[in-house]
Structure formats: C-alpha cells, structure tokens
Amino acid sequence: MKRKLLVITGTPGVGKSTLAKKIAKYLHFNRLDLHRYYKKLAIGYNYKKRCYDLDFKKLITFIENKKRKSPQGLILDSHLAHLLPRKTIDLCLVLVCSNLKELRTRLQKRKYSQQKIRENLDAEIFQVCLIEAKERRHKVMIIDTSVALPWKQLYRKISKSL
C-alpha cells in the first residue's frame, strides 16, 4: 500500500495545526509538525521577516523520509506545504478564513506585529496559498474554518479523496 501524504496549508491563524491533529487521529496518520524542524532545515534566518528561510531540497528529502516511516500516511501542516512538488502530495487541503475580523483576532492573540498581521491578512484576501497550490496542479480541497465544520462529513470526504 502506498503511504499517503496529506498537506494542510493556509495563511497563519486559519487553523492548520488544529485540523491536522484531528484528521491525524481519525485517519491514524502520523502528523509532522514542521515548525519543530525549521532550524534544522533552514539555510539561514531572515531577520527582516523574523523567520527561517528553508532549504527546499533538504525539506523534500526530510518529508520523504518521514513519509516512508509512517505506516498509514503522513499529515504535514504548514503555510509552505503547498509549495512541495505535485508528485509528493496526494491531497492538499487549503484552509481559508473568510471572516477577516476573526483571523485578525487570532493573529493578535499570537502577538503578531501590526505589519505581520497586515501581511497575513493580505495573503488571505488575495488567496495566495490557494492560487499557489492550484498553480502547482495539486489535488485541492478548500475548507473555510470561519464556519462550523461538519466533522464526520469532512473526514469521509478526505478519506475518499486520498
């Protein structure tokens, strides 16, 4: 059986990690919290943006190794997950938050600077993650996290799509 890779992407604050944990439990997939490995996979630190610049070759090799070690499959949640090559990903969930006030509140709770909040709201307004995922021709499923999610229905839909 081919091990599956389900990626969950979207701008910061849309609920990627929350959803990834729930889906991983339901599907019995391992969840890869990429944030824990950013330093290891980085080519350097971007002081202007206050984040790590990742080495994508290292990242792809790292994910493929983790996928091989996952009996059922692997879930990767990151705002960069959709940038992986098409052949690597079985399904790309793009989370959106259509309620921008709610998204702003979530980002403020994280103590993001006003500049970082503006940057992320702009990315959400212009649907950057969705457009980039479609440009890479991923099999995409869009989920709006600003509305109540029908969990059982969502799990079934994801299972069928994998």
Image (cartoon, rainbow, N blue to C red):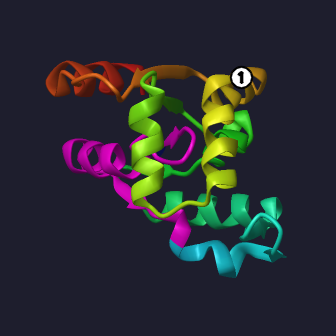
Q: Label 1, secondary structure: give it.
A: helix
Let me know if residue 5 appears in the view.
no
Between 110 and 61, the one nearer to me in the picture: 110
Quadrant of the rendering where the N terminus is positioned: top left
Answer whether residue 34 is magenta in the image: yes
Q: Residues within 10 Å of mark 1 (few under 14, many from 20)?
A: few
At x 40% / y 23%, what residue is drawn?
A: 144
The location of residue 48, given as percent across then percent down, is 83, 68
Let me know if residue 135 appears in the view.
yes
Quadrant of the rendering where the C terminus is positioned: top left
Residue type, label 1: Ile
The residue to which callout 1 is attached is 131
The location of residue 80, given as percent across then percent down, is 66, 48
Answer with left or right where residue 69 lies relative to residue 44.
left
Between 67 and 79, the one nearer to me in the picture: 79
* Magenta residues (range): 6-35
The location of residue 34, given as percent across then percent down, is 54, 64
Q: Is residue 108 above or below residue 58?
A: above
At x 20% / y 18%, what residue is drawn?
A: 153
At x 29% / y 52%, what residue is drawn?
A: 21
The location of residue 26, given as percent across then percent down, is 20, 42
Residue sticking out furthest to the bottom: 40
